[in-house]
Amino acid sequence: MIVAAAHATTLAEDCLQRNAWICPEYVRTRWPDISAALSEHVLITVVSVTLGTLIAFPMALLARRLPRFRGPVVGVSTALYTIPSLAMFSLLLPFTGLAVATVVTGLTLYSLTILVRNFLAGFDGVPEDVREAARGMGYGPGRLLFGVELPLALPSVFAGLRIAAVSTIALTTIGVIVGFGGLGNLISRGLNSFFKAEVFTASVLCVFLAVVADLVLLGAQRVATPWRRGANA
């Protein structure tokens, strides 16, 4: 038993020497670096998607209430997504410097394309007769929005949030060009040194984050729209 345990330990340590793609010993010995990069990745993603939501919501409302602004709002948000990330971060540098704000600002702008379109689609999907019925019951603009329109638009809203979250998790890695890329920092460092375990582990964690974010938002959608559970079943 002792010999077997010693042999297993030797194999685990040997994966670093062999520069193996899958290496538990790398995770064990470098966990502080991994957890710091993971925390940064999560923080950047959450802040970017939250800010994107806070900006996209009024933009979608403006486009919905005033049709003449619909074209410019959708056009501007779409145009932002066509800017390459390297160019986007470079354009932001004079204003935000080499800071995490550069990455957050860029990712927030990128998320607007997805969020504005989905929010608009959700509001457009609310039947006009439902709005008229609510107005006939004395609903004012605010109550109509938050009591009728927004709840009915939630499926489309959450669909946008899920896509934006997964997209932001992927794009966060590009923040390495300004030194704040979360798990992208590990991927870049691993590629430069050809450290296979570092590249593989960081990449797997990116995929894991995307799956977890999607499942969390899907669960939140189910909680926020209980009336759809029966229909989905």
Image (spheres, helix red, strand yellow):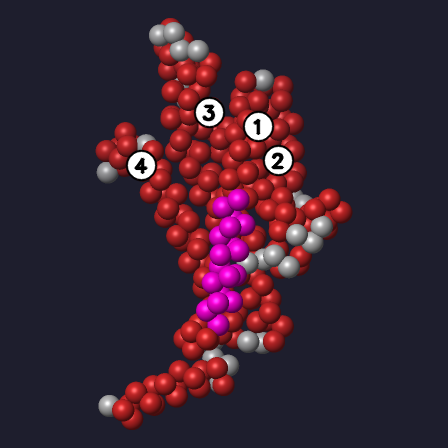
Closer to the chain start, of discs 4 and 2, is 2
Residue at horizontal 51%, vertical 50%? 43
Q: CA distance from mark 1 to mark 2?
A: 9 Å
Q: Quadrant of the N terminus?
A: bottom left
Q: Is residue 65 visible?
A: yes
Q: Which mark is residue 108?
A: none
Closer to the chain start, of discs 3 and 2, is 2
User: Amino acid under label 3?
Assistant: Phe
Q: Is residue 91 visible?
A: no
Between label 3 and label 4, give the one nearer the viewer: 4
Residue named by callout 3? 123
Closer to the chain start, of discs 3 and 4, is 3
User: Amino acid under label 4?
Assistant: Val
User: Amino acid under label 1?
Assistant: Met
Residue 171, placed above or below residue 127: below
Q: Which residues are magenta?
A: 30-47
